[in-house]
Every structure is written in structure tokens, then in C-alpha cells.
Amino acid sequence: MARRAAGGGAGSAPGTASVREARRPELRLPPLEPYDGNGLEPDGDYDGLEFRETDLAGQDGVGARFMDCALTGCALDEASLPRTRLLDTVLSGVRGVGVNLAEATLRDVELHDARLGGTQLHGAVLERVLIRGGKIDYLNLRRSRLKDVVFEGCVLVEPDFGGARLERVAFVDCALKEADFSAATLTDVDLRGAAPLELARGVDRLSGAVISPAQLLDLAPVLAAELGMRVLAPE
């Protein structure tokens, strides 16, 4: 069930600034069957399965569909999963370097306590996705579409949102380090919960985002540089 966005109702005072809240997934998985297969298959169909401590490193699951599944403690190093569809699925404690999820679709997905590096999600579509806890290094979301996505209590190191479209995306108690928003389009993106908030590129694309007064002060040198301003103390 979607939560009603605060401050966006009919009773809001004219001109009151507000940001529409991201709708979080609300998953209720059915009883799951243990996965007992020998590996993923291209265009495979996985429905109502539990993958527990499964070694999926190097597996080829291009175009596969996971629906009503749980992946817990799985190894995903170099897993090839482009154009995969993850629907109504929970991933907990997954780990891996170089996971390829290019052009994947994630809808009503929760990702908890992941330890990932170099994950490729360029050109992907994420809708009603919660990423909670864990650490993700060098997340590639270039030219992806994110709608109703929440990053909560996680650490993102050098995430790349270049050319992406973000709508109703929130960063809650989340570390955002050296993020790239170049050529991105932001609508109702709430950055107030990002600490630290560090931008490597794309500060000129923050129209449509909400930041706190303290963050504005922290970003002042970057904003001044973007505008070509020099800030000098009086002589």
C-alpha cells in the first residue's frame, strides 16, 4: 500500500514547498520452495523459490524472470543477468563484484545488507525499490529510470546516475560519496537524509532535488565553482 506524501494534500497552503514521498514496496511472499537446480539458465523462469546461500557466481541468467522469490546470502560475483526481471522479490545479504544487471527491471524489490562492487544497472528500470543497509561501490545507474526508490541506511561509493531519470527518490540516513548526476533529470528527489552528501559531477542537475540548509552550506564551494565564482576573503 502506498503511503500518502506529507504536505502534498489539498489542505497545503499555497506556495508551501513540499516533496512527494517515494512509495515503498510492501512485500508479502508466499510460502517458498527451496531452489534445488544446478544453475541459472538464460530466459529461465523462477517463481516462488528460495535461493539460500546459493553460489550464483559466473552464472548466465540473461533475460531470466524472478517472481515472488527470496535470495539470501547468495554469491553473485560476475553473474550475467542483463535484461533480468526481478518482481516482488527480496534479496538479503547478497554479495559480489561485477554483477551485470544492465537493462534489468526491478519492481517491488527489497535489497537488504548487500555487499556489492561494480554492479551494472545501466539502462535499468527500478520502481518501488528499497535498498536498505550494506555497502555498494561503483554502482552504475547511467541512463536508468528510478521511480519510487528509497536508499536507506546504506553506503554508496561513487554511484553513477549520469543521464538517469529519478522521480520520487529518497536517501535516508545514507552516505552518498562522490556521486555523479551529470545529465540526470531529478523530480522530487529528497537528498536531506544523505550524510555525507558528496557530488563529483552534476551539481547543475540538482533542480528538482531537496536539500537541507546545512547541505547547502557544504555544497557552497561546488556551487560557486559551477557558476565560475571566486570566493575571497576581504583584504
Image: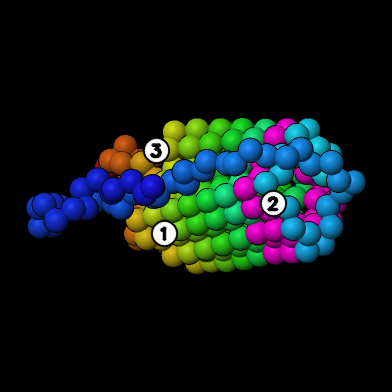
Residue 13 x %, y %: 9, 52
1 and 3 marks in contact (CB < 8 Å)? no
Say which mark, if any, is on residue 167: 1
Q: Nearer the viewer, mark 3 or mark 2?
A: 2
Report which residue position mark 3 lands on: 193
Say which mark, if any, is on residue 55: none
Kind of residue at badge 1:
Glu
Kind of residue at badge 3:
Gly
Disc 2 secondary structure class: strand
Q: Earlier in the sequence, mark 1 or mark 3?
A: 1
Magenta residue span: 58-85
Q: Nearer the viewer, mark 1 or mark 3?
A: 1
Which residue sits at x=71%, y=48%? 118
Front residue (pair 36, 216): 36
Residue 69 x %, y %: 66, 45
Q: Earlier in the sequence, mark 1 or mark 2?
A: 2
Which residue sits at x=13%, y=52%? 12
Report which residue position mark 2 lands on: 47
**Cα separation between marks 1 and 2:** 29 Å
Front residue (pair 141, 94): 94
